């Protein structure tokens, strides 16, 4: 694996998560957290992962570094909890 995109695709595939080429290309894209409180139910793994947004990631890559996954980012953007710059 040579690139970060390949590493993320590999890790997501290992966990059974489908990550699109578009999502991988968005890795350096600016990410803005809209939610002011964690909308997930605690205690849960999704709640714990969502807490990663409050650590201040400024890009999709940093969100991955804080433990978020491709499906988290896709879902949270669709729900309006975060915004990803186009």
Image: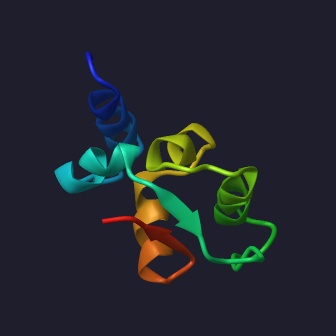
The outermost residue toward the top is 2
Residue 29 lies, with reference to residue 38, above or below; the image says: above
Provide residue 49's location: percent of width, then percent of height: 66, 55
- Determine the residue positioned at 57% across, 77% down: 81
- Determine the residue positioned at 46% across, 41% down: 61
The outermost residue toward the bottom is 79
Residue 43 sits in which quadrant?
bottom right
Give the quadrant of the N terminus: top left
Provide residue 3's location: percent of width, then percent of height: 28, 23
Q: Nearer the viewer, residue 57 or 8?
A: 57
Q: How many marks?
A: 0
Left or right position of 1 against 12: left
The outermost residue toward the left is 21
Residue 26 lies, with reference to residue 6, above or below; the image says: below
Q: Nearer the viewer, residue 83 or 16?
A: 83
Left or right position of 70 against 44: left
Residue 40 sits in which quadrant?
bottom right
Provide residue 53's location: percent of width, then percent of height: 66, 58
- The colouring scheme, among rainbow, by chain, secondary structure or one colour, is rainbow
Give the quadrant of the C terminus: bottom left
- Determine the residue positioned at 39% across, 35% down: 11
Provide residue 21's location: percent of width, then percent of height: 18, 49
């Amino acid at each position: 694996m040579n690139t970060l995109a390949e590493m993320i695709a590999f890790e997501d595939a290992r966990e059974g998560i489908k990550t699109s080429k578009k999502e991988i290309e968005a890795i350096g894209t600016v990410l803005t957290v809209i939610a002011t409180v964690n909308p997930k139910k605690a205690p849960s793994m999704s709640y714990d992962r969502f807490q990663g947004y409050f650590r201040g990631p400024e890009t999709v890559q940093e969100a991955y570094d804080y433990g978020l996954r491709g499906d988290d980012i896709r879902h949270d953007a669709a729900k309006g909890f975060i915004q990803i710059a186009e």
